[in-house]
Image: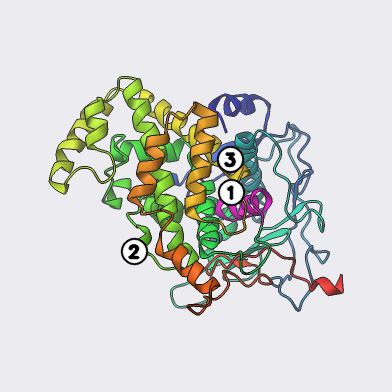
Amino acid sequence: MSMQLDAKLKVEGTRFRLFAQSRYLKSFSEPEIVYVSLPPGAVKAGPEDERMFVIDAIGKKPYDRFGPQPQWDGRRHPPVEPDANGHFDYVDINSREFSCTTMYATVRRVLDIWEDYFKRPIEWAFQMYFERLELIPSIEWDNAQSGFGFLEFGFGRLPNGGIDHQSPYCQNFDVLAHELGHSIIFSEVGTPDTEASATDEYGGFHESCGDLVAIVASLHFDSVVNHILKHSSGNLFTVNELDRLGELPDGREIRVAFNYERMSTVSAEPHDLSLPLTGAIFDIFVGRYQAELVARGLITLDLALRSTHGQAPNSALPQIQAEFDQAYKGHEEGFKEALLSARDYLGRLLATAWDGLSANYLSYYKVGLALLKADRRLTGGANRDNIRANFAWREISLAHPVHLMRRLSETGMITPRRPYANPFMPEAVEHCSLAHRPLRDSSAM
Ligand SMILES: [Zn+2]
């Protein structure tokens, strides 16, 4: 959300605490206060509000096609109460109740951020079945899944098998934000009408959007922004060694943004296929950030051009970094303002572009066209060269082999690939197949 609205919520919102990254990372071991958009008193015991509710279920197994169907009406722990002033940041971070408050606060915060970029509410895709999103923070399971009308989370897996109770998925901001990203795309872009109109690139686009939703949301944490800037001295383009990002690569989302994949280097598997698109869009954001730095007189145009992705030979990188080190020192706040301004541009750009996209026969090329159109609306086309150059570098074009394969399969010249997802299975985090239909058999409803 915009910097202005964020400042307003700090006065008017309801307080929670959560961890920006894994709490076991040294740089992020302290929880941060976040404010959700509802005023104190509007978030009820649960926590719950008019869009979502937490159920701390007892003895629940993961939803599947055979057991009880969403939403859960079995046994549960008592709802978590707000304090006398309506806030929830009093909850002990080592208690069971913290899982409930942190899951609610993460999902609510990510929804707040993206509704602000859309400038309107994001309606749930499942609203013909359920009024509100069900959040189940903790079940005895070494996985997590998002499905039609619910998110339910277990724990990580130990290296030798078994449940790792030290890593509850519900406290992983990136994972939750990514899953909500899928929900946003189901709401705003929808699902293909037929199997034939469901392209491989629709699957890749979905995964890419999940990552981008999480990245933009993560960039609302001071600790994450400060960490990235400090470890790179503000040089985001030539971060070719992820070690330089310190502990952040342990989180998937930021890590996947710094990738060098092109359409010719990835397979049709949705996560793999998502990488060129995520990389292209993240680099558009970095290009915008560099332009902000130049406009603010913090770096020269010459340095911006030389440090642009893919421009400089490896031998020139130490010199470029030295120039950034010098430019950054003493101007940390200016760099941060430029980054936050570029973040808000990216959020508005994506929301505007997604608004105009159809799920049928979706291609990355069409995503590029939608971004150009969105940029024209937002800035009069100030970033068109940036968008074109980054899509070209990633080899996203009309004539890409993935499209060709799709067209050939439609004409029967090659065997069609498997559909992008089994529509009746919810998304398991580790396997991440897309879910867009209710779990229950629709004939039984
Ligand atoms: Zn996913």
265 on left or right of 281: left
- Magenta stretch in the rendered image: 177-190
Local SS, label 3: helix
The residue at the point 61 percent across, 71 percent down is 141
Which badge, 2 or 3, comes first in the chain's sequence? 2
Q: Is residue 180 left or right of residue 269?
A: right
Kindly identify the amino acid type of the residue bearing the numbered disc 3.
Answer: Ala
Q: Quadrant of the C terminus?
A: bottom right
Name the dominant secondary structure of the magenta segment: helix
Q: Which is more toward the observer, 185 or 418?
A: 418
Label 3: which residue? 351
Using the numbered discs, state the Cα–Cα distance from disc 1 to disc 2 in whole angstroms.
43 Å
Q: Is mark 1 within 8 Å of ligand 1?
A: no
Query: Which residue is at the front of the view, 72 or 40?
Result: 72
Q: Residue at x 61, y 46 (%)?
A: 106
Tag in front: 1 or 2? 2
Kindly identify the residue that appears in the image at 27 percent across and 25 percent down.
299
Check the image and report above or below for 301 versus 229. above
For the residues labelled 2 and 3, the Cα–Cα distance comes to: 28 Å
Q: Position of residue 127 (x, y in %)?
A: 79, 53
Q: Position of residue 124 (x, y in %)?
A: 73, 50
